[in-house]
Amino acid sequence: MTDEALAVIRDVTALLEEENVHLRKGDVPAAVGLLRQKEAVLMQLDALDIDCKRDPNDKDANCCSEELPAALENLENVLADNRVLLKRALTAQRHIVEILARALPSPENRTHYGKTGGYVPSRGIPGRAYRNNA
């Protein structure tokens, strides 16, 4: 069971490291491309049930393999980096959306001319129904 757990932890760590490389480069589409793989390996990680048993007579015995704690520590470090990089990417995306939204013309600045150049009266003008029915 420990070997399977180590393999899954290493797969998750490798995939997160790859995502971190893309995020550091600012290549968000490549990072998003890893999303399905990330979901799959995280489901495998979630399904793990690491049951370490230690000999109660041997106080110095480690309950798991020697590699498991190191692999978990490495995974935690990579996850912390991933969290920081994802926050940066989200902040950058939010700033881009804000810049684009500010560039749009405000509704007050719209003209009443259509695509062909003809005048198009705005809707909701009081008395319009009276004029149209006259």
Image: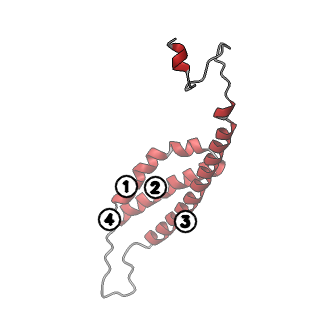
**Residues packed near mark 4 inside 10 Å, few (<14), some (14 to 19) or many (20 plus):** few
Q: Where residue 79 appears, x then y in whole percent?
A: 52, 61
Q: In this rendering, which labeled residue sits more in front, label 4 or label 2?
A: 4
The secondary element bearing badge 3 is classed as helix
**Residues packed near mark 2 inside 10 Å, few (<14), some (14 to 19) or many (20 plus):** some
**Splitting the image into 4 quarters, where does residue 83 fall?**
bottom right
The secondary element bearing badge 4 is classed as loop
Is the Cβ of the residue at disc 3 closer than 8 Å to that at disc 2?
no
Q: Where residue 53 appears, x then y in whole percent?
A: 31, 76
Image quadrant occupied by the N terminus: bottom left
**Splitting the image into 4 quarters, where does residue 105 fall?**
top right
Is the Cβ of the residue at disc 3 closer than 8 Å to that at disc 1?
no
- How far apart are the alpha carbons under marks 4 and 2? 16 Å
Is the Cβ of the residue at disc 1 closer than 8 Å to that at disc 2?
yes
Q: Relative to residue 134, is residue 57 drawn left or right?
A: left
Residue 11 circle label = 2
**Residues packed near mark 3 inside 10 Å, few (<14), some (14 to 19) or many (20 plus):** few
- Where does label 1 land, which residue? 44
Picture layout, residue 25 above or below residue 80: above
Q: In this rendering, which labeled residue sits more in front, label 3 or label 2?
A: 3
Q: Name which of mark 1 and mark 2 comes first in the sequence.
A: 2
Q: Nearer the viewer, residue 27 or 115?
A: 115
Q: In this rendering, which labeled residue sits more in front, label 1 or label 2?
A: 1
- Where does label 3 land, which residue? 77
- Where does label 4 land, which residue? 49
Q: Nearer the viewer, residue 69 or 132?
A: 132
The residue located at (62%, 54%) in the rendering is 88
Q: Amino acid at mark 3?
A: Asn
